[in-house]
Image: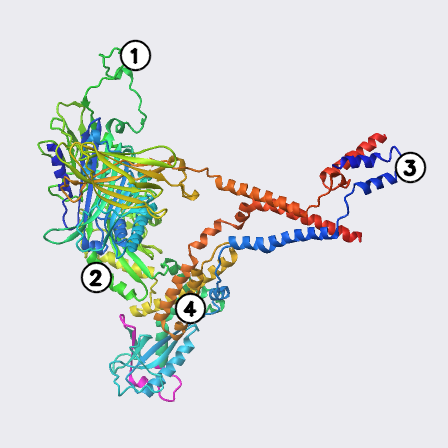
Amino acid sequence: MASPNAADASSAPEPSKETSIIVPRAAKAHNGPPPESKEGIWLRRAAILSFWAVVVLLGLPVWWKTTAIYRAELPLQDMTDWAESKICKPVFPLRIAVESSISSHDAQQLVRLTQHAIDDLNEFSAHHLRLMPATSPYTANSSQEVIIDGTSIRSDDRDNALVIRMIQVETGETPRSQLQSYSPTLDVYYSASQLPAQSSTSSPLASFIAQELHTVFAEEQAQLAYLLAAQPGAQAARTKALSVEKYVELDRQSTKVLKYAPTYHLTFSLFSPSYTPSAWNIEAALRTYLSPLLESFSGISNFTVDSQVQLYATFSPSIHQPEFDEHLKAWTLRKEDLSAFVNAAEWPLSPSIGEGPTVNFILYVPDASQSPLLVKENAGNSWLIPQWGGVHILNVQNVSTTPNVLTAEDLVPAMHTFSDQLTVLFGLPQAPASLPLRISTLERVRAASLIFSASSTLGALAQVYQKMPSIPVPDNVAQSVDSTIAHLQQACHLLREGRFQGALEHARIAEVEAEKAFFERSMVGQVYFPDEHKVAVYLPLLGPVAVPLVMAALKELKGVLASARGR
Amino acid sequence: MLSSRLLLLLNAFIAFAFAGSDYHEQLLLRPLPQDTLLASFNFRSNESQASFEQQNFRYVPRSLGQILQHAHTQELHLRFSVGRWDAENWGQRPHQGSREGGTGVELWAWIEAETEEQASARWLTLTNALSGLFCASLNFIDATKTIRPVMAFSPEGDHRNAPNLHLLHGTLPHEVVCTENLTPFLKLLPCKGKAGISSLLDGHKLFDASFQTMAIDVRPVCGLESGKCSLEMEQSVDMVLDIARSKRPKDNPIPRPLPIDQIECDTSKGFNAQDTCFPLNKGTEPGWTLEEVFGKPLRGSCPLVEDGEDSNSVCINTPPERTIEVRSNGDFSESRLASDTLRCYKLPVGADFDLVLPEQKMTTGLVRSDPALFAARSINGHGQERGSTQAIIRNPSTSEAVEFVYLESLPWFMKPYLHTLRATVDTSSESPIKETYYKPALDRQRGTHLELRMVIPPSSTLTLTYEFEKAILRYTEYPPDANRGFDVAPAVLRVLTPQAADKKGIYIRTTSLLLPLPTPDFSMPYNVIILTSTVMALGFGNIFNLLVRRFVGADEVPAAAGGLKGVLQAKIAGIKAKLGRA
């Protein structure tokens, strides 16, 4: 198109030098397009602008909106605060009832002095004991109840952590104390002369009681301190209450303990490498030895119990077969093989159906030709598998004939081992000697750990929400988060009031809700369908449409700039 | 006839159950025509209802027991099958077809539930849990593959205490049954395939068989007088082995011809020469041993089997003249039943046991009993839109009419036209259909469920045909091997009269069908996107250019107009001018 003009322009000067100035000017004037009208220019610009306006104001938002993923609003700040333990600092005010037959005035005085002594001894501020004079449910009748100022309580109140029963004796060494094994009661024996005088500021009896209480609750304090120390932002809480050795020991214990769940499934399995014994009286054994224990745990978790008999169970080929030890007169397993003793590939130890983890207890009866079977290093016959269960090797007394049926009596040692293993797996503290006291300690520790775990789940969810903008967040996640926060607040509130049972209840719900929110299934799918994909699918449309738009806009801009410069 | 009746009796005997915990197992061997061998394994364990409810499992495996409790399943029937039972040659099916399933996986169960929705939810739980236990795709049994049969199945167990029972039935005809299903099956046995007859079961032989079916049946059984209930779990494996094929050694599995000097030649043939040979058909029963055929030795008895009348673990059904040697180091005992046509052996504990049957020329044979019905089904028609199904059912009996239920469970994408349903009998003009139950399909929600109660007069053939339309599926609904076609579950026939001797019933199943559906080109969506985008972009570009371009005459275009072409031409012109000047 331009070639004749160009040829003209370049060749024109050659033939006629004198007209060289005129010809190109004339050619230009003649061949150039007529100047555009102002309206034409403005119309064109308006057209381009309107296209751009439609694309930017309508097209892109509609595209964005229709391909966007729904993300419910989450209270991110609250969630992070919970995770950093900024909102709830758990405290454990324990109420201890002091039950005595002395006059209320004397009792008040004793309680006051003992409280002083305890406060001096206590090094762990979050955990403190509050003594209250109490009336015994047996001695108190309506006429004697002199609760005027609200400082006295009844000793059979469920919120009491411990009851101290003051018993006046004439003989024996005084003061002395006795912790009852099956009730949360500490009996303190004293002689009348040891009661503090009205004006005195210290008393040997009071400091004795304080010392005793301190010992009783030492384990609990250590456990709680250990828990608190593991929390973020709780560096200050690391107290003197926890020595390094104690910390290491608790650390070791906590790796064995099962993760908290509202329901545990206990599976008792009898394994035998041959066909005997093929039956066991497990029903009676469980009823006698396990049911009471499970009943006392029922305030914290529920349990289902099942049992099975599995014959022809062979060891996994990866472990050393048992060897005969002349010295022990027994077949021995090497300690390093114990971890592979359970042949997971062949032994049917699949988890039970339903919510909650399964705890396996294995009773292994060795073949008559390999009996007795012991652990080489310590001649033991049972061991615990952290967070999974326990194993007990039952060596039948009469080696020559393995009985066909194991009676309940045969199962007694195994049942004792299993109940010990269960308490360890469950996280029941080793001290003090009173079982109800240990269970209530566990209740407090569990409540605290649940609060911490739910809070940290919330924190993790907040992080996921912020770091992964491409995942969808449905409304029920927001609901679960709200419910978690509400229950956490309740739990924290109840802890402060010293009502631990209720606190555990709320903490448990909070934990379940938090897990539900975090593991919401529909949040995962979209991760594999990233934003780039959206663009890639629409590229065949967006590319060809964008090119003329952009080119036209550039050209027009150039024109505007040129005319601006020209002016 | 005699032997087969006794066989039935024996089967009924095996099925007799006690309340309480016990365990029984039995292997029944029966040589079939064409050098094949039917091996029926049967394992039965009982658990008292009380200990089952307390979850103290002894013989019934814990893994399955917990699934049943969790899904509130009162009775369960699960089948894994491969191959086809050749009824023309082999006669009646083992257990009269009551322990057999259609090709692939078949599952039906009676579930206790208040409402239909609850039953469906529990059914879903059940299929998912079983899927994990048996390494099968049972979790793909969804609402479209589930039906609620009305006449075809009735419970085998005693369900006096369970009023709200729902029967659900699902099939997976596409499922390939293989070793990974056998391993969990063996693990459910108390002796785990390490002792007893289960030690013969080997995946290589089982899935190489001409026909094999594995069944699991769980049902509650109550004593008649005592009223004590127990849970009975029956596991059975029926397989038909080709003896020559099974005897191939493991180190030389490829069939090769013997050297010519080892073959006995038929010298009566005209082409018989030094280097050519027609193998002589000796008309003898082939020789075999248990170890040869199953590839594994039988490792004695499972010691859990209680002593009693039916503690004979291995039985073989042959004519009395057949020579059978027993090879064992332990104590075993033999007993002969049913006028010597059934030889049973009590296995030794802890010692291997083997039966040796030498090659033998037989003068007598066993009477082979015919099945109640012969059934075959096929797809007719061509094209990608329509087709028709034809089922041919024959009554071989010369005296008795047979009443039966015909059950079809069709996938939703195969839409039958019920008005084209025709059933004709060649010997009479009367319609054989007595009762019809039909539940039409809903797209993507449920499949067709068709049940017909029909009667065939003696020595007659019934032809059942109906036409159907093939649906067009969505892009994502096609399986990865879409061009292979879609499997249609076998039809189930339940014989009502003559009545079965026990509650298990008489069943016959047809083979599954392969339904070809129109299959798209799977790169289509992206092509469509690109094509539409191009068309839209073209239109947009044209309109846009029309609106914003300025149109001028061809000679009005400025000389050094922008663009690559203009620049190039200006350059070329410049060079030309320079050259011209030089």
Q: How far apart are marks 1 and 4 (CA)?
A: 94 Å
The residue at the far left in this view is B339
Q: Name the residue under label 3.
A: A18
Callout in the foreground (3, 1): 3
Q: What element carries label 2?
A: helix
Give the chain letter at badge 3.
A
Residue B275 is marked as 1
Q: What residue type is labelled 1?
A: Asp
The mark that comes first in sequence, 3 or 4, is 3
Residue A288 is marked as 2
Q: Which amino acid does label 4 sit on?
A: Ala
Numbered range of the magenta stretch: A180-205
On whether residue A187 falls in the magenta region, the answer is yes
Q: Mark 4 points at which residue?
A: A486
Give residue B76's position: percent from left, percent from top: 24, 47
The mark that comes first in sequence, 2 or 4, is 2
